[in-house]
Amino acid sequence: MAAAAASIPVVAIDGPTASGKGTVAQRVARALGFYCLDSGALYRIVGLLALERGLDLDNGPALAALAAGMQPSFEDGRVLLEGRDITDAIRREEVGRAASRVAAVGPLRVALLALQRQQRRPPGLVADGRDMGTVVFPDARLKVYLQADLHVRAERRLKQLIEKGYSANLTDLLRTLRDRDQRDETRDCAPLVAAEDAKVLDSSALTVDEVVARVLKWYRGD
Ligand code: DC
């Protein structure tokens, strides 16, 4: 890594699906005036494109080529790819499932490293995902591992989906989240695990405001 990049602070927020890390990362980034990287969106974009193009979800070379050639942009909360707004498409459950499958493919993870590290720009970056603190930004100034009880996460996801006008039910969501946790935690390549030097925070009984306040306190060292 270039010496200049190493001096740019990173806050890494990792954790399982629906632990609230995306919302927390955005809020912390806003409070610090930092950029924000939603690394899960990159895996979701690859999942979406692979489904659309009929690619095998374990075809390493094809997925890596797809990732190396894509130039997504993130503007005002929207995700754009070659002029197309894919913000809602990448949030669909079937795309989330595809993302979880392609995320187990080593060559794809390597292909996405550069894209993620390019987001490290002054004055700083808040990055959320599964391996921000362990693999992508091991020198992050602060590493947070955000977890929450499976039922709490399923309820939160259900609320989100219903608010967006999608139909969903709790039993299916519990199964989907459990499957996805299992796949993310047990894959060989960059499995979901707290970095040794991460601060672990259980958000089950906390509001978003409380989690954000705790992360900012840690970052500021008090
Ligand atoms: O956070 P999310 O649900 O949007 O992530 C979608 C999938 O991408 C998730 O199943 C795991 C994978 N992922 C990953 O493997 N590494 C990351 N840094 C981010 C997401």
Image (tube, helix red, strand yellow):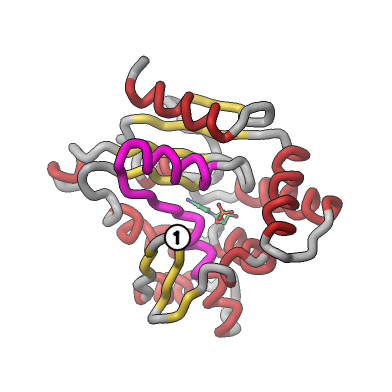
Q: Residue at x 20, y 46 (%)?
A: 122
- How many numbered circles does the render carry? 1
Of residues 71 and 162, the one nearer the viewer is 162
- The x and y percentages for residue 132 are 42, 43
- The x and y percentages for residue 197 are 42, 25
| Magenta stretch contains residue 222 | no
Of residues 19 and 77, the one nearer the viewer is 77
Q: Residue at x 79, y 60 (%)?
A: 168
Q: Is residue 19 above or below residue 171?
A: above
The quadrant holding residue 210 is: top right
Q: Which residues are magenta?
A: 21-45
Residue 62 shown left or right of residue 36 in the figure: right
Residue at mark 1 = 77
- Badge 1: how crowded within 10 Å, few (<14), some, or many (20+)? few
Q: Is residue 113 above or below residue 31?
A: below
Locate the C terminus and report the quarter of the image it occupies.
Answer: top left
Q: Secondary structure at mark 1?
A: loop
- The x and y percentages for residue 176 are 75, 55
In this view, which residue lies farthest toward the right?
Answer: 171
In this view, which residue lies farthest toward the top?
Answer: 222
Q: Amino acid at mark 1?
A: Gly
Residue 222 shown left or right of residue 181 in the figure: left
Q: Is residue 63 above or below residue 150?
A: below
- The x and y percentages for residue 71 are 35, 72
The quadrant holding residue 112 is: bottom left
Q: Does the rendering let one see residue 182?
A: no
Residue 34 shown left or right of residue 110 in the figure: left
